[in-house]
Image (cartoon, rainbow, N blue to C red):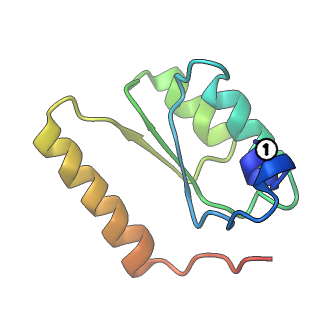
Amino acid sequence: MEFLRKEGGYANVPRPDIILLDLNMPRKDGREVLLEVKSDEKLKSIPVLVLTSSSAEQDIASAYSLHANCYITKPVDFARFKEVINSIKTFWFGNVTLPPHE
């Protein structure tokens, strides 16, 4: 969150075009991060792509209720994972008009 808010040593970092977010992170739950991002006026326009191992309906519903822009279940097969990453790249950076940076 310090990086996204450009706090401390991150004052001069570029704003990300998108955020790939895992729900199951070691220090902070991804749902908390999603809530913080989408509640922050300066960050909420950044698309958040949930990319996680969970396919639980509750997790999917929760992510969308917190305004995730999409929910992708990580494939366990590496070749399929590469396909998913390439499709994200093609869609989000080839087809979508992303919000302007402030």
- Camera-side residue of 64 and 33: 33
Vertical arrangement, residue 93 with respect to residue 42, above or below: below
Vertical arrangement, residue 37 with respect to residue 93, above or below: above
Question: How many tags in the picture?
Answer: 1
Dot 1: within a 10 Å radius of its alpha carbon, few (fewer than 14), some, or many (20 or more) residues? Answer: few
Q: Is residue 16 left or right of residue 13?
A: left
- Camera-side residue of 96 and 10: 10
Q: Position of residue 40 (x, y in %)?
A: 86, 51
Vertical arrangement, residue 40 with respect to residue 15, above or below: above
Q: Position of residue 45 (x, y in %)?
A: 72, 64
- Camera-side residue of 91 and 20: 20
Q: Residue at x 81, y 77 (%)?
A: 102
Q: Residue at x 56, y 60 (%)?
A: 18
The amino acid on which the numbered mark 1 sits, given as a three-letter code, is: Glu
Q: In the rendered image, which residue does mark 1 sit on?
A: 2
Which corner quadrant of the image does residue 31 belong to? top right
Vertical arrangement, residue 79 with respect to residue 95, above or below: above
Q: Is residue 40 left or right of residue 96?
A: right
Q: Name the secondary structure under disc 1.
A: helix
Q: Residue at x 14, y 33 (%)?
A: 77
Q: Position of residue 27 (x, y in %)?
A: 65, 19
Which corner quadrant of the image does residue 34 belong to? top right
Q: Residue at x 32, y 35 (%)?
A: 74
**Quarter of the image that includes the N terminus:** top right
Q: Is residue 20 left or right of residue 63?
A: left
Which corner quadrant of the image does residue 85 belong to? bottom left
